[in-house]
Amino acid sequence: MAANVYASATDGGSGGDSAQTRSGTGVRTAGATIDCPDAGSKLTSVPEQARGEVDKELALLDEQIAKAYQRLSESAQQVRQDPGFADNAVVNPLKEKRAATLERIAIAIDRVGDRPKGLEALAACTVEDGNEAPAQGEGQDGGDEQPAEEQGQAGQEQGNGQGQGANGGQAGNGPVAADFADIKSVQPNANDKGGASGGSFATSCGVNENGLFNSDNIIAAPGVTNGAHHFHDYVGNQSNNAFASDQDLAKAETSCDDQGDKSSYYWPVVRLQNGAQEQDAQKPGGGIEGNAGEIVTPKQVTLTFVGNPREKVTAMPRLLRIITGDAKSFVNGPANANASWSCTGFEDRQLKDKYPLCPQGSDVVRTFKFQSCWDGRNIDSANHRTHVAFADAAGNCPSGFRPIPQLVQRIVYDIDAPSLQDGGRTTPLFAVDSFPEQLHKPVTDHGDFINIFDEDLMGEMVDCINDGRKCGAGADGGQNPAPGEEPQEEPTKTPEAPQEEPTKTPEAPQEEPTKAPEAPQEQPTRTPDAPQNGNGGGKPADNGDDGDDGDDGKGGGAKPPADKPGPEPEPGDASTAPGGAQPEVKATASADGGNAAEQGGGSKNGDDEDTDGLGDSQAVGQATSAAPTPSVPSRTEPQAVGGGGLADTGAQLWPAAAGAVLVIAGFVVLRRVRRSHM
């Protein structure tokens, strides 16, 4: 190995301080990283019966790389003294461990199907210069990538010659100055397309103000604690952790204003490299794995589903899982990368492999545009990618795929541009959490989504998008609302309806009204200073989600406010999408503690009735740590019932007054009649 690969490991940048001095966690080699072939992306076909075991072995490969990187990062001095140290002490032992793990994967698949070929060739890893960007090419968003030369020039301009590991970040494993670019130096490169299904549906689920974090990934590593090796923000579903079964997710509480949306939306946290010690500082997924600094709560999160420029969209299947972007794209290359960074006021300029330096008064923006084509059968796939796809530049889905609503996530942060000239000492650097060997590169940004919309609300979404309307509980809080356009497309309900019953029963309004999403104006978007019975915006340790037990990530769950309608009942067949006959949907295995997924379907009671709201088409494994079933919040009544104003009181009393007058008049007539007979 060349000595200069590691020389930047402790280069302190302009200030001269080493990564060791700044982090206090030992010598780190920000200039070097471990590059291993991604076995998971190569396994495009894994029999359902082997999925659980294979997922756990793939997670073990990630853990092996993380530990090897830690060993390398703490051995800068030995590497400088002996160039062969990295191979002998890190790379070769890693190859042996990976070979054994890959063999177990091959055996697991061979038991129930055809043995995969070529896995043994994926065992060998190399040590690479962490300051060299991966080869540029087309990303997965179908041609909107910024030219590599433009991004590289922008980064070098801002790097001030410090591209060789300016200070290595708080934990010594990035970011570096060359990871940033002035947004004003980027040419406009983003364009939006209209089309056949030009409407949109927005859901409002907060900004994770209740502080629900964990370092699990239920999609990529179900049943594995700390499977992500970095922390995620969660909004929507409040029971998402590595051990949540499909039933747990279906029964969970949600932070979304519309209780019909229990979907799980999650992404890596962004941290300020300001020396702060979060409560995960000494925990897996946090400081132990190089994810250090203050977690930044987003200023705004918008979740919008849009249509397809060529044809109308069809409903997403329930429990569909989508990962967009590639958490390992720094070493894997950009084939599946889908990062998009910008600044408010400059969102026609998007950066893929640089963090933006925003001018004063402008905020940092992350945008994820998810895959918008579905294969019509599977809610997940072995590599978590092949069941969904991006449409091409013209909006056409691949052969055999159909268009579905496309999730567009926009996350805004109030973050000042860091002071690169002094390595972030005056104004701190910021970075997205990552696998430790990915060095917090911006290209590794990614997002995850699990669809748990109820059937009626999904149908409403599809109709809204296909009709060209703007709907949903978050329709008035998005980034680019159409002037004068209101979200109240379906004003079927009015809050005065219960007043037609003069009786004062407070139960009167509970006549099972149709779903609340048609009236989003009654449920304002939650703000960061209103943590609805959550943990008050606490950090990771407040939730017990430190990766030590099966309850990770629950954080107590954000309970819906008392003035929100309670959760709607789950549809009888959770896998059946609205809109008539639907294709057979193949389910994926849930966390099962290492055993093959059960094939029997959802839970049933003694009368053979579906009791878990998932239907028979879902294959559900045994959760090793089930989330508790949240209590259903009581519905509060409209204030117009049982407690009206003076006008309401008068309206209710005038019949009694009229009756009293008639009674008095009757007495007068009766007395006169009696006197006339005397």
Image: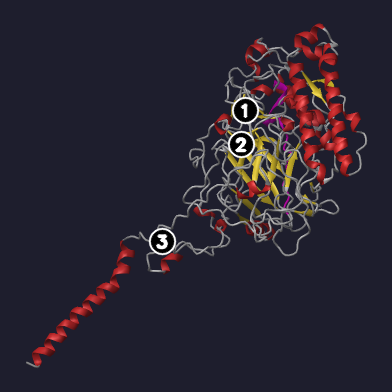
At x 46%, y 61%, the residue is: 495
Residue 364 lies in what quarter of the image? top right
Q: Are marks 3 and 1 in contact (CB under 8 Å)?
A: no
Which residue appears farthest toward the right when viewing the image?
Answer: 117
Q: Which residue is mark 3?
A: 506
Report the Cα–Cα distance between label 2 and label 1.
Answer: 24 Å
Q: Which residues are magenta?
A: 176-194
Query: Which image quarter holds the C terminus?
Result: bottom left
The disc label shown at residue 271, or none = 1
Q: Looking at the image, which is closer to me, 678 or 30?
A: 678
Secondary structure under badge 3?
loop
Q: Residues within 10 Å of mark 1 (few under 14, many from 20)?
A: many
Sequence-first tag of 2 and 1 = 1
Q: How is the image coloured?
A: secondary structure
Q: Amino acid at mark 1?
A: Arg
**Would residue 635 appear left or right of 314 to someone viewing this image?**
left
Q: Which residue is mark 2?
A: 551
Report the Cα–Cα distance between label 3 and label 1.
Answer: 48 Å
Question: Visible in this render: residue 140?
Answer: yes
Sequence-first tag of 3 and 1 = 1
Sequence-first tag of 3 and 2 = 3
At x 18%, y 79%, the residue is: 664
Q: Amino acid at mark 2?
A: Asp
